[in-house]
Amino acid sequence: MTQKRLQTMDPINISDLPVPIVHHIMSFLTTTDVTRLSILSKKFFSLWGSYPVIEFDQKRFGRTYHGTLASMTKDFIQHVLNSIRQREINAVLSEFRVNANFESISVDSRFDTAILMVLKNGVTCMELNLGFADYVLPNMFASKTLHVLRLKGLHLDLCGLIKVCPLLTTVLLKSCVILKDAEFSSKTLREIELHSCDVKCIKLDGPNLHSFFFSSDKGDPKPCDIDVLKCRNIKYLSLNNVVNGGYWIEEHVYTLSELKTFILKGCQDIGHIRICNDKLVRVEFRHCHALTSIEVRATSLESFAYEGIESAHGGMPCNITFLSSKCIKDLSLKGAALVTDQWLETQLAIMTRLERLKLKACNTLRRIKVIHEKLQILELCSCLSLVEAEIHTPQLISFTYRYGNANSMERDKMVTDQWLESQLAKMTRLERLRLKRCNSLKKIKVWHEKLQILELCSCNGLEEADIDTPQLISFMYHGNVIEFGKMVTRGSCITTLSMIQWTTYDNASFCKWRNMLSFFGHCKALRLICNSPKVYSFFFFFVIQHKCNFTSYLNA
């Protein structure tokens, strides 16, 4: 469209647009901004009144309120009721959300009235986050339009709630007290999540239920009888902090024939578990510290993760056995004490489709051989006993090695100037290189035709760097002032220099600083992070002198 034509067109007011388009624009604004629009004109007040999303936040309401918490809560409830009464919603109300803290505060009937008015307007999604209140939904709570219900801090009868809301598809309850045993059936329910809810029995019959999540209170887990065996179409099953033993879990995993994902986390009373389901694709065990044996038989399994205890002596001695693991593509083990060199070598020979391998805090590994034709991502982190790794992976595109924490100094001698130069010569397709706390590096040469991203962080022994990387587009350095023999990059390279605080500010120090900066005058952007106004002022003078295009940050 030409500029002349644009000048001849009449301006379009937002209030002249069709109502659905204005509502769509309003959906990108905050609740406060939407409310402010309503005072611009009668037209905008009408648009605000018909906007199908209502949200109230007690914290935002209380920012300008002066008074006690109890009086503020009462006025907030009145504000909710008044706002709903002012609206004339002809279309279906899509969402109603309230974030408040009604703990230890009695909630009168005005809040019940507000909820019933919203239900009458055909709300489809309701979210009530009321803290740890003793609030109970009104007796007349019922809806034939409600699809999504998210509640926190309420007392409720879940079985009765499902009956009076027959079209519910998603139910999420957090820190709720379920007054009766939750035994019900639903043909529409597809997803249910119970987080830290006080409930003794859950028995569901949902032919269309696809996802079930249950988490007991981590600080005080209580037994709960769970039975979802009649929900034959469940694809996602996650159990956190359950204390019912392991047999019923094995039965559910075996019986739910459509199950794709199974996650067990924080269960402290299960010593042995056997997982058997040929449809399973993803299995995770995390922080189940009593587990001593895991047996997995799942011919379609693609992802397996185990997370035990990180310690210098290895993790909890848990024996992991795969009866069928040819399809596994992602294997993640953390704190697995019984993962030995031989075990790893055996599994790699069987897992012919493996693409990602992550080993963290597996402190029984010493001399490993990672020989695999399809492995693409390899991570070795905090395996404190590891002294040697032989890696032959022609498809590898990402390799990460970390030894211990920031104070671990024993293994920094592994990466030397000669080792780095030798590896760069072999890795002809390398695009990103990150070296952190490699304190044995002194005078490095980074010559590479395809390298695009280079990061040198906290390599405290580094004195000189010779960099010839014509494709480099991002360079980051964190540490002391060093010398550069060469700095060849793209003209579009963005450089970040994060400098450690200087101990002296003499002429020699500024001379070295000036020489270092001179190698980056050709960069598209030069960013400085420092904590010294003197260094920053010198940097500003240097940039003006060299006419650099830069951004800068000063951390005082």
Image: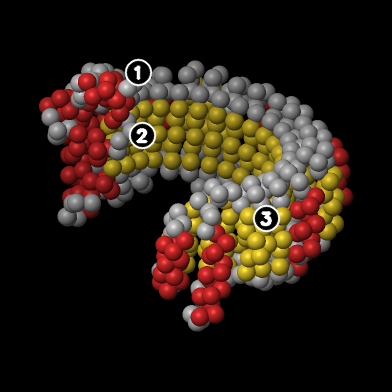
The three-letter amino acid code for the residue at tag 3 is Asp
- Count numbered badges in the picture: 3
Residue lying at 47% horizontally and 19% vertically, measured from the top left: 188
Residue lying at 21% horizontally and 28% vertically, measured from the top left: 48
Say which of marks 1 and 3 sits in front.
3
Q: Which residue is mark 1?
A: 144
> In front here: 309 or 332?
332
Residue lying at 44% horizontally and 64% vertically, measured from the top left: 545
Q: Which residue is mark 2?
A: 127
Q: Is residue 110 visible?
A: no
Callout 1 touching callout 3 (CB < 8 Å): no
Q: Report the side of 551 relative to 233 (left or right).
A: left
Q: Which mark is residue 468?
A: 3
For residue 205, above or below residue 287: above
Question: Mark 2 or 1 closer to N-term?
Answer: 2
**What's the CA distance linking mark 1 and mark 3?**
68 Å
